[in-house]
Image (tube, rainbow, N blue to C red):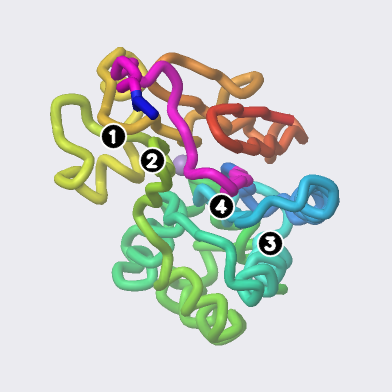
Amino acid sequence: MTFVARPHLPVQKPQLPAGVRIYAISDIHGCAHLLEPMLRVIDADVAHNRPLYAIEVFMGDYIDRGPDTRATLDILIERSHRGNAVFLKGNHEAFLVKVFEDPSLFENWLGVGGAQTLMSYGLAPPDLTRDEPATILRDLIRVMPTEHLEFLDNLRLSYTCGDFFFVHAGVRPGVPLAEQTEHDLLWIRDEFLRSDERFGKYIVHGHTPVRSAEFLANRVNIDTGAYATGNLTLMSIQGSRMLAV
Ligand SMILES: [Mn+2]
């Protein structure tokens, strides 16, 4: 019997390893009421398709802006006990941790939806004519469950599987994936969004809202601005097939 070598074809489409099915959800921003039904969609899909390995990738920005950060973190922490979920860090989680260390940033946090987070933990709407930022933050740390604070402290910057690289915001063009800075991975917009560079992996990201999942040759953006639009996007990937609902 003769074995004929197949010509080495260039990889056309990014691939996941055989048997792996990934579910990615981006930018929940306190929309627990959208997250709950999405998790039921995932559970039904897993029950129907029975992948060998089902992996859930949450893309960061769990908190702020939307109505219920507290319930969102409760749901995600509960979900983490299954052991097949990856939780990426978003710029909002990184920023809140920074605000805890530096109360002078408190007003900036209010400008990006921090008041909704405070109120989700049962605190009054912040009134800076009456209360010092440090006092409000001390109250928040007091009412936040320890598991929530630990959750915020234990988020990953990126996740790689097969030909896919999952990250909250994006990557800096011209810099190898392994050498990206935390700041770029969590905050970058224009330089990344304008680039047609192939980054070594296919980038799955959120952070910059688009009307519907945006599939490009080098990346896919799945942030559909849930807190403003009511559309939380779920993307499933198996083999090289990407599907956003
Ligand atoms: Mn973001």
Using the image, tell me which numbered label, if any, was put on residue 142.
none
| Picture disc at residue 72 | 3
Task: Say which label, 1 or 4, has the lower sequence index.
Answer: 4
Q: Residue at x 31, y 22 (%)?
A: 5
Question: What is the spatial separation of the Cα atoms under label 3 and label 2, in whole angstroms?
Answer: 24 Å
Disc 4 packing (10 Å; few <14; some 14–19; many ≥20) = many
Residue 194, relative to residue 2: is it above or below? above
Identify the image quadrant of the N terminus.
top left
The reply to whether callout 1 and callout 3 are in contact (CB within 8 Å) is: no
| Residue annotated with mark 1 | 171
From the image, tell me which residue sits under label 2: 165
First in sequence: mark 4 vs mark 2: 4
Q: Name the one closer to the observer, 116 or 35.
A: 35
Quadrant hosting residue 196: top left
Residue 198 in sight in this render:
yes
> Magenta segment range?
4-25
Which residue position holds label 4? Answer: 58
Helix, strand or loop for the magenta stretch, by majority: loop
Q: Secondary structure at mark 2?
A: strand
Is residue 124 at least partly visible in the picture? Answer: no
Mark 2: amino acid: Phe
Is residue 5 rendered magenta in the image? yes
Disc 3 within 8 angstroms of ligand 1 (CB): no
What's the residue at 72%, 59% (across, down)? 68
